[in-house]
Image (spheres, rainbow, N blue to C red):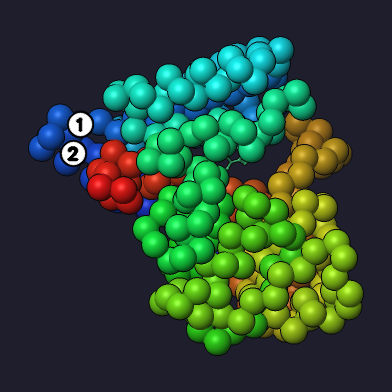
Amino acid sequence: MKLIDGKQIAAEIKAEIAKEVAKMIDDEDENPHLAAVLVGEDPASQTYVASKEKACQSVGMLSSVYRYPAATTEKELLDVVSFLNMDPEVDGFIVQLPLPKHIDENKIIEAIDPKKDVDGFHPANVGRMVLNLPAYVSATPFGIMQLLERSNVETQGKNVVVVGRSNIVGTPVSILLSRKAKTANATVTLCHSRTKNLKEICANADILIAAIGVAEFIKGDMVKKGAVVIDVGMHRVKSDKTKSGFKLIGDVDFEEVSKKASQITPVPGGVGPMTIVALIQNTLKAAKKEIYG
Ligand code: GUN
């Protein structure tokens, strides 16, 4: 069994980005700028946004965070989006999800200018991705695709099983892997809570992507010997073995599944670092006007 080291691969990509950013600053005096909007006090969201800021700084990009209280109204947030759409200093921005319940997330996402939608959540970017047109691809699926590519995982003609059909991960990654493209051309099965015979379907996967959001859902008997396993889950659970009293685990029972897989992503240090780096890559594309010209 080989670990797919997302931290290492992300570090390699970051080094490549840092070089490009330095060149842009030298040649054009342009410094890519990512803005993040954070509404409320959700601890996980605060951690994610802090990681995104840190990653920008580590490659020499500018970053700014717009923080608003949980009581912010939908109208106020729409005004912030509108402001960022027009701000020439900002190349791309994200609105961190989840938003407080009284705000319609879809309404906010649809208000973002697709040219600045580095999360790739706007219907225009999702549609363009489906049609294989240049698009911002959302960070986790984009990160997974690069993990597979840089780990030399063959996808052509392989059986890929994706467990979980979220808009952010399961659905887009299933589309990306079934497209006619170099790191794709797979036969993809998208499973969800209503899927029958889930165990049998998973056990037929050459590549299994777990994005169901349930801790240690994928057990050893659901995995074929030699399969490649990508764990998208991230759950903070109590542990008496760590100093902090907590540990991070994924959607895959690592102990059991690592005995069967040929390659597997750890949690933490697998998909997580790739998600952050993919967002930075999208921001660079925004600054270089690569998608929309
Ligand atoms: N919440 C969890 N993941 C994400 C993400 O990739 N982008 C945004 N905006 N919010 C998230």
Please give the name of the residue rendered at 52% of the width and 44% of the height, measured from the top-left corner: 122
Residue 169 percent coordinates (x, y)? 63, 55
Q: Could you say which is closer to the camera, residue 146 or residue 252?
A: 146
Location of residue 172 (image quadrant)? bottom right
* CB atoms of marks 1 and 2 within 8 Å: yes
Q: Could you say which is closer to the camera, residue 155 or residue 117?
A: 117
Compared with residue 11, is residue 230 higher up or lower down, i.e. above or below?
below
Q: Is residue 239 left or right of residue 168?
A: right
**Residue 30 disc label:** 1
Residue farthest toward the bottom in the current orientation of the protein: 157
Dot placed on the residue nearer the N-terminal end, 1 or 2: 2
Residue 60 percent coordinates (x, y)? 31, 32
Q: Helix or strand or loop: what does disc 1 sit on?
A: loop
In this view of the protein, can residue 122 be seen by the observer?
Answer: yes
Please give the name of the residue rendered at 76% of the width and 33% of the height, measured from the top-left corner: 243
Dot 1: within a 10 Å radius of its alpha carbon, few (fewer than 14), some, or many (20 or more) residues?
some
The response on whether ligand 1 sits within 8 Å of label 2 is: no
Compared with residue 11, is residue 5 higher up or lower down, i.e. above or below?
below
**Residue 24 disc label:** 2
Residue farthest toward the left in the current orientation of the protein: 27
Q: Helix or strand or loop: what does disc 2 sit on?
A: helix
**Residue 64 disc label:** none
- Circle 2: residue type: Met
Residue 212 percent coordinates (x, y)? 77, 57
Q: Is residue 68 left or right of residue 246?
A: left
